[in-house]
Amino acid sequence: MLNPVALFRTASSRSASSRYLLNSSCSKDEGYESSSDISEEPCMFSGSHQSTLDRLYAWEKKLYEEVKSGEKARIAYEKKLTHLRNQDVKGDDYSALEKTRAAIRDLHTQMKVSIHSVEAISNRIETLRDEELKPQLSELVQGLARMWKVMAECHRSQKRSLDEAKVLLAGTPSKLEAKRHSSISITDPNRLARSAANLETELRNWRAYFESWIASQRSYVHALTGWLLRCMRADPDTSKLPLSPRRSNGALPIFGICIQWSRFLDAIHETPVLDGLDFFAAGMGSLYAQQLREDSRHVRVGSKRFGAGTPDEFSGDMKIVEVGQVEQVMTADKMAEVAIRVLCAGMSVTTSSLTEFSIASADGYAELVNQWDNAKA
């Protein structure tokens, strides 16, 4: 005869995946609910990744609820068995014994129904995992590999252009000076300050979005790998799993791929990119602050233009205005030179770090694609 107690204990270990997936949302205590209404709709192979994850979540929640209600029935079943033995020892009358036996039979039937539901839901989850989630993850990894390859090529090209620009900047000062004299006017410093402030804001946003993006990828892969490991019947210790994504000890290739994916994202470091963006943004911020100080100084110099006095004094004031104007033009030239150098330095550091990160990411994802292809062979 089927041993429902032993089988339910086995099913309970499988339900750990649902607890991991649902987190705190599973803490609500819900009553027993039969799974006779389990849908048998066909898999949506053309469905989106989000749709697949939503349905996996729904099935895992059903599994959790079924295991929880079945566990309650198992506990009640064992208590009734103990009660029946005590009644038999005490020599209770036949009607009392039959009443307890009837309750035990009902609980036994309830446990068998729950076990069947648990097995059906588990099979459904495995079907979704193998026939929908797996190809979607393969497509996602391939897409990320293509994206980072293009990103690496673009950042390499940007780095080469910046290196060439730095050589020109260092080698032809006279041409740059002539260029500045022909293009800079009295109003340029204000525009330069606004541009520096706007660029600093965009760089801060870029840094925040980049950090959040990488952290989200890492969190997603960690959660996915953790859930998949809870689907395994073997020891979920990742350090004992082989590096090869091929089937090993009954594990599907998707397990090994996701483990490698998780290790790869843990090994890659985005800190140099974040530091480079911070450096670039700080340079723009200091440029803006310096321009504000220069503007304040120019206001103090310009205030000497006004006031009552003799024509000689007025002539003297005119000389002050001319000196102030020359000084302001010189400051604009100097600020333009500083701005160019700060801009080049910030772009160089940022682009270099992005290039290294993109190359490392492209290589890592290319290796994952190769492992996935080898697993299919």
Image (spheres, rainbow, N blue to C red):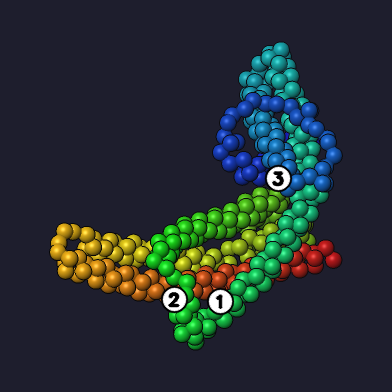
Labels 1, 2: front one: 2
Who comes first in sequence, dot 3 or dot 1?
A: 3
Give the residue number, with chain letter if any, for mark 3: 50
Confirm or deny contact between disc 1 and disc 2 (CB under 8 A).
Answer: no
Q: Is residue 69 above or below residue 93?
A: below
- Asked if residue 281 shows in the view, the reply is yes
| Separation (CA) of disc 2 from disc 3 | 57 Å
In the rendering, at what x and y percent does residue 121 appear? Answer: 76, 38
- Please report contact status of discs 2 and 3: CB closer than 8 Å, yes or no: no
The nearer-to-camera label among 3 and 1 is: 1
Considering every residue shown, the one lying at the far front of the view is: 311
Which disc, if any, is residue 373?
Answer: none
Q: Is residue 187 above or below residue 174?
A: above
Left or right: residue 25 versus residue 94 is left
What is the C-alpha distance between the residues marked 3 and 1?
40 Å
Disc 1 designates what residue?
Answer: 162
The residue at the point 49 percent across, 65 percent down is: 277
Q: Secondary structure at mark 2?
A: helix
> Quadrant location of the C terminus?
bottom right
**Whole-number angstrom distance, CA of label 1 to CA of label 2:** 23 Å
**First in sequence: mark 2 or mark 3?**
3
Q: What's under tag 3, amino acid-wise?
A: Gln
Near-viewer residue (119 or 170): 170
Along the viewing direction, whichever of 335 and 116 lies nearer the viewer: 335
Q: Quadrant of the N terminus?
A: top right
Q: Where is residue 304 shown, x and y percent of the image?
A: 21, 63
Residue drawn at (50%, 58%) of the image: 202
